[in-house]
């Protein structure tokens, strides 16, 4: 808004910011409202400095391929529901056109609902579920909420007012949901392969112990805020990638047909789709990567300098508090790295082509210690 920002476009320079000298740029420089006033804002994406480091360390083991593997059947169940719902829709209305974006959003709402909170939202069957209504409150905030968010960026002193960026109904909803779920699970000794269970186990493990200074207390509020960011960090991003991927497949029937052949052949060879089998589909991987190149969910990466810093090989010295932006979208469309960038071409992600491109020119999940925690190889 009113503060100048440094936009760094050269991979040789921003690799220092994102990775090599990350300790100078640990924060994003956004979200001035502190978590005490709005517990839902106390999540990983907005956390700062030491607290962020401790929280990230605590949560990182939640996102391992082993854990995601256990969640795979939950995801598969939602996919089966998606197929059933689409078949039913086509059968009932005899129509061959569907609002794909809406189906993708309902599908990923269901996936994150079951993997993050262990609840079957079933928004595919019931598009008006309370969960979906609350999601829309976050994704389409009222004018008043937007004004509060803009003001808090414009006027730093605003953090001393009791102003909440999020609609209070959102905090209320997630807080009730997590607390009720936690106490119900503990009382009935319910264990489920989802994020809430992992965080609940971390909470239980801390009981009766004195926490070391580099630990984070997993209170109900801390768990609520992380569940919230897992939900919104995961739902909108995945839904939009899926939507754009399907859009490009519709525009490129040859690519669609190659992908379909790979999926059908793999299914025939391996039987039921599993986590491991999905990983074997190299063309699917290329298609998804190309969709993430053309349609990155975050168009830019934000950092702020927390220590004075001289950018190597330049005469630029950054004062503390300098806001930095790394323009993912522009980098992904730079013809120097991606010739004919408007073309959807999964072969850009063949091993040879990846090898021949300069490093750090593909940033759909950011990079460095503050990259997307949901990115699992
Ligand atoms: C296609 C799916 C996704 C995309 C494209 C995506 C993209 C991103 C990007 C670009 C960032 C910022 C990285 C940076 O600043 O360097 C980020 C951060 C984050 N993402 Fe994702 N994300 C996806 C899925 C998920 C999922 C499924 C979850 C959780 C369940 C998640 C949770 C987070 C969190 C918590 C952060 C903040 C990390 C931190 O500050 O330490 N994301 N994501």
Image: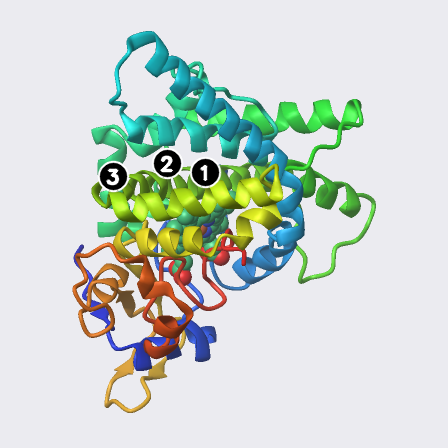
Q: Residues within 10 Å of mark 3 (few under 14, many from 20)?
A: few
Query: Which secondary structure, mark 2?
Result: loop
Q: Position of residue 227 (x, y in %)?
A: 54, 38
Q: Nearer the viewer, residue 61 or 84?
A: 84
The one nearer the camera, 15 or 43, is 15
Assess whether mark 2 and mark 3 are in contact (beta carbons under 8 angstroms). no
From the top left corner, tell me how far across and down residue 59 is, in percent: 61, 52
Q: Which mark, residue 375?
A: none
Q: Residue furthest right?
A: 208
Q: Is residue 155 visible?
A: no
Q: Is residue 109 above or below residue 125?
A: below
Q: Is mark 2 within 8 Å of ligand 1?
A: no
Q: Residues within 10 Å of mark 2 (few under 14, many from 20)?
A: many
- Mark 1 to mark 2 CA distance (whole Å): 6 Å
Label 1 and label 3: CA atoms lie apart by 43 Å
| 266 versus 138 height, above or below | below
| 53 lies left or right of 254 | right
| 146 with respect to 66 (left or right) | left
Q: Nearer the viewer, mark 1 or mark 3?
A: 3
Q: Quadrant of residue 325?
A: bottom left
In the rendered view, tell whether residue 340 sits above or below residue 281: below
x, y percent for residue 372: 46, 56
Q: Tag on residue 164?
A: 2
Residue sitting at x 61%, y 50%:
276
Front residue of 179/231: it is 231
Please indicate, yes or no, whether residue 6 appears anywhere in the rendered image. Answer: yes
Quarter of the image where one finds residue 123: top left
Q: Residue at label 1? A: 38
How far is the residue under mark 3 from the one under mark 2?
42 Å
User: Furthest residue to the top?
Assistant: 92
Quadrant for the N terminus, please.
bottom left
Badge 3 is on which residue?
250
């Amino acid at each position: 808004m009113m503060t100048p920002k440094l936009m760094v476009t050269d991979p040789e320079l921003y690799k220092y910011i994102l990775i090599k000298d990350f300790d100078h740029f640990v924060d994003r420089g956004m979200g001035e409202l502190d978590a005490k006033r709005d517990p839902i804002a106390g999540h990983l994406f907005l956390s700062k400095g030491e607290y962020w480091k401790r929280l990230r360390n605590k949560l990182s083991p939640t996102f391992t391929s082993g854990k995601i593997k256990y969640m795979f059947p939950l995801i598969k169940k939602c996919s089966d529901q998606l197929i059933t719902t689409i078949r039913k829709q086509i059968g009932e209305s005899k129509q061959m056109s569907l609002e794909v974006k809406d189906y993708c959003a309902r599908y990923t709402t269901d996936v994150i609902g079951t993997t993050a909170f262990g609840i079957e939202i079933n928004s595919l069957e019931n598009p008006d579920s309370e969960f979906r209504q609350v999601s829309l409150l976050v994704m389409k905030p009222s004018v008043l909420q937007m004004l509060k968010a803009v003001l808090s960026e414009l006027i730093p002193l605003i953090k001393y007012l009791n102003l909440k960026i999020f609609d209070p109904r959102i905090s209320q909803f997630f807080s009730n949901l997590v607390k009720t779920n936690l106490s119900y699970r503990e009382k009935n000794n319910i264990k489920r392969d989802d994020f809430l269970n992992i965080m609940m186990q971390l909470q239980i493990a801390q009981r009766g112990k004195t926490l070391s200074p580099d630990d984070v207390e997993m209170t109900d509020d801390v768990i609520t805020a992380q569940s919230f960011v897992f939900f919104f960090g995961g739902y909108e991003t995945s839904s939009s990638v899926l939507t754009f991927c399907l859009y490009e497949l519709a525009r490129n029937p040859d690519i669609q047909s190659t992908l379909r052949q790979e999926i059908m052949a793999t299914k025939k060879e391996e039987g039921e789709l599993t986590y491991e089998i999905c990983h074997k589909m190299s063309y699917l991987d290329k298609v998804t990567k190309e969709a993430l190149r053309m349609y990155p969910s975050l168009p830019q990466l934000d950092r702020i300098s927390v220590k004075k810093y001289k950018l190597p090989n330049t005469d630029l010295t950054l004062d503390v508090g300098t806001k930095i932006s790394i323009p993912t979208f522009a980098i992904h469309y730079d013809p120097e790295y991606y010739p004919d960038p408007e073309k959807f071409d999964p072969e850009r992600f063949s091993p040879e082509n990846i090898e021949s491109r300069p490093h750090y020119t593909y940033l759909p999940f950011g990079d460095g210690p503050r990259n997307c925690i949901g990115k699992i190889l």
